[in-house]
Structure formats: C-alpha cells, structure tokens
Amino acid sequence: MASILVCYGTGEGQTATVADRVADTLTDRGHDPTVVDASDLPSDLAVAEFDAVLVGTSIHVGKQASTVTSFVTDNHDALVARPTGFFQISLSSASDDPERRAEAAGYVETFVDETGWQPDRVGLFGGALRYSKYGFLKRLLMKRIAKDATGDTDASRDYEYTDWAEVEAFTNDFAAFVEGRLGLTPSVGDT
C-alpha cells in the first residue's frame, strides 16, 4: 500500500470532484490517499512523507490555479524525488476539435516550463460549465468560450464533460506505475 497525496486547485468545484474520484479509485486499489485543496494546505503537510503525489488543477483563462503553481514550486524537490502525476480539467479537453485538445496540452507544457516539474503521468479531462454559479459577467464570458469549445451556451443549466471512465483509467495507470516504482504488489481484485 502506498501513501499518495492528491493536491488540487479548483474554481467551481469540478476539480475537487475529480480529486475525490481519484482518491476513491486509489482506495479501491488498496492505497492510502490524502486529498488536500492547494488553497487550504495544512500547516504540517510534508510532501516528503508521501510515497507518491498527484496534482490536479482547473484551467481558467488559459492558466492553472495559482495555488497549484505555488504548491508545485514550493515542493519541487520533494516532487521530483517520488512518482508523480498531474491532471488538468478544462473545456478544451472536452472538445473533439484537435486544435482545442492541443491547446489543453499546451497549457501543461507551459506549466512544466514555468515550474520546472515534469510529472511522470499526465491526464487531461473535460471539466464542467457551472452557469448556475457564475455571476453575470462570468456567465457572458463562459458562454463565449463555450460557444467555440462545446457549443453549450444555454445558461439556464449546468453541463458536465468529465469522462469518469477516463479518470479511473488514468488513476489506475498511475497506481500501477507507482506500484512498479515502489516494488509493491497490487491488492487482489485490482484492475
């Protein structure tokens, strides 16, 4: 069993929901995940005490959450010393358009360049449109973005684009990678 830190940054909560599903999948494999919000890190959190780390963030206006960037920068040495993964939630990843999907990958490349951290595994997932949580101006902005990305501009409802099977497959791949790196035997029934 590996102790795995899942640190995330979120805007409207979809990345928190993904982080929770990641943790559930890790638990199902027999690991011990600890989920923390990068904007509310415990003062006694020591990344070096974990066997592996997953970092997740949402994208807003082409940028990852600043709290996640700070977390990675502040813990760079501990991150490079253990198995790590990164997952990113964006509307660009929800699109079937190859240019939009390349845009999502480009956000990761920029993040890696800015932080100097190269995660071992990367997952790109569709996010959500939470029109019900947006103020007037943000709703207008998100409708413009959504028009190009997904076409879902009916602001009278919310939309979720996260492919949960893809999230679980990414998490299982990461867990298998960690198990291999740490020489752990997966629990019976693991997938």
Image (cartoon, rainbow, N blue to C red):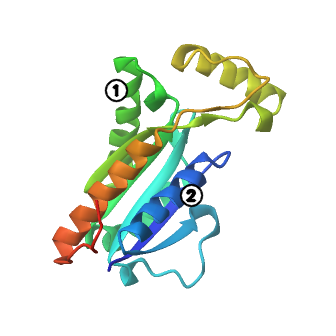
Query: Residue 45 at x, y = what percent?
Result: 52, 80
Q: Is residue 115 visible?
A: no
The residue that label 2 is drawn on is 67
Quadrant assignment for the N terminus: bottom left
Amino acid type for the residue under numbered disc 2:
Thr
Query: Residue 39 at x, y = what percent?
Result: 63, 62
Q: Which residue is more in the foreground, 30 or 15?
A: 30
The residue that label 1 is drawn on is 102
Query: Residue 172 at x, y = what percent?
Result: 32, 57
Query: Residue 79 at x, y = what percent?
Result: 33, 68
Query: What is the crowding at mark 2: few (fewer than 14 residues within 10 Å), some, or many (at least 20)?
Result: some
Amino acid type for the residue under numbered disc 1:
Ala
Q: Residue at x 17, y 71 (%)?
A: 181
Q: Residue at x 51, y 38 (%)?
A: 162
Could you tell me how far apart the alpha carbons at marks 2 and 1 are, in whole angstroms? 24 Å
Q: Residue at x 34, y 19 (%)?
A: 98
Between disc 2 and disc 1, the foreground one is: 1
Q: Which mark is residue 70?
A: none
Q: Is residue 80 visible?
A: yes
